[in-house]
């Protein structure tokens, strides 16, 4: 079990506002998701910090790209949430463009962790992000977050429905995996560690 707990004791590394300022690192895993999907909570849960990534009641604030250094020498990148309704359309488009450029071109990326609220999975912008990332031929692991808000039966139904809805990307050869996750109940942590850990080991 070489991967266990490698997110623990992650350290804040740097914050940047522009793609041209991204740090020179060679192994990073990117975390993306719609605003309010539970991305910051997931990062905090995985790292065992309460406030490493800020958890917000007012989503859409974080426009920065935050880097956290992991104990295995790699980095975790917390990217701006997308799809927040209360920002002007021009700003939203700018973020989507920024993320698209990053996903399409950043050399250091080993894989993508995409966080989706399990009650509202695979929204249009999530699909756009998968499309941006598809040509990279790199793995994507999807966390269906806030799973505690669903009954056991609803969880299974959602997992099945999402897997089915991912077929277009799977048939394009994308390496996709999906799991249920809850920051509140701390469930699904080992599964993420296992999968994302293997990305760092693979090169
Ligand atoms: N019930 C429940 N609520 C959660 C969970 N994860 C996040 N939330 C709540 O969802 C809201 C948005 O979470 P946040 O992590 O800030 O989302 P972000 O915008 O994607 O970074 C906050 O009110 C969190 O407390 C979870 O696993 N279960
Ligand atoms: Mg956040």
Image (cartoon, grey):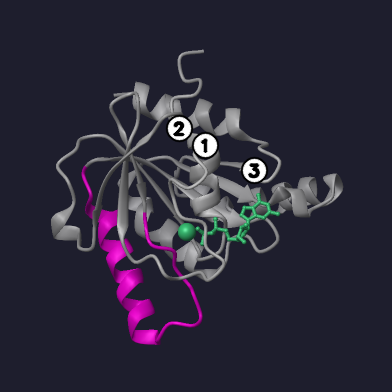
Q: Do the numbered discs 2 and 3 sit on residues whose CB atoms are within 8 Å?
A: no
In the rendering, at what x and y percent does residue 100 appear? 31, 63
Q: Which residue is mark 2?
A: 196
Q: Is residue 193 above or below residue 13?
A: above
Q: Which residue is mark 1?
A: 46
**Residue 190 figure quarter:** top right
Give me the residue at 66% from left, 37% from top.
186
Closer to the N terminus: mark 2 or mark 1? 1
Residue 94 falls within the magenta-colored stretch: yes
Residue 65 in the figure: left or right of residue 4: left
Measured in 3D between alpha carbons, the distance from the residue under mark 2 to the one under mark 1, in whole angstroms, is: 11 Å
Closer to the N terminus: mark 2 or mark 3? 3
Q: Is the CB atom of the residue marked by disc 3 within 8 angstroms of ligand 1's nearest atom?
A: yes
Q: Which residues are magenta?
A: 79-107
In the rendering, at what x and y percent does residue 197 appear? 44, 26
| Closer-to-camera residue (136/8) | 8
Q: What is the number of the mark on residue 72?
A: none
Measured in 3D between alpha carbons, the distance from the residue under mark 3 to the one under mark 1, in whole angstroms, is: 11 Å
Q: Which residue is mark 3?
A: 181
């Amino acid at each position: 079990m070489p991967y266990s707990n490698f997110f623990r004791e992650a350290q804040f590394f740097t914050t940047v506002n522009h793609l041209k300022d991204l740090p020179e690192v060679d192994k990073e895993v990117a975390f993306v998701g719609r605003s309010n999907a539970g991305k910051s909570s997931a990062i905090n849960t995985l790292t065992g910090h309460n406030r490493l990534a800020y958890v917000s009641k007012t989503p859409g604030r974080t426009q920065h790209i935050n880097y956290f250094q992991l104990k295995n020498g790699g980095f975790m990148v917390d990217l701006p949430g997308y799809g927040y309704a209360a920002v002007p359309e021009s700003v939203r488009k700018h973020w989507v463009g920024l993320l698209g450029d990053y996903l399409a071109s950043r050399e250091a990326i080993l894989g993508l962790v995409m966080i989706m609220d399990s009650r509202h999975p695979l929204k249009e912008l999530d699909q756009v992000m998968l499309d941006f990332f598809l040509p990279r031929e790199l793995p994507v692991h999807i966390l269906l977050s806030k799973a505690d808000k669903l009954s056991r039966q609803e969880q299974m139904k959602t997992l099945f429905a999402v897997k089915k809805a991912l077929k277009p990307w799977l048939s394009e050869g994308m390496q996709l995996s999906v799991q249920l996750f809850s920051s509140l109940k701390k469930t699904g942590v080992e599964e993420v560690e296992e999968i994302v850990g293997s990305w760092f080991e693979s090169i």
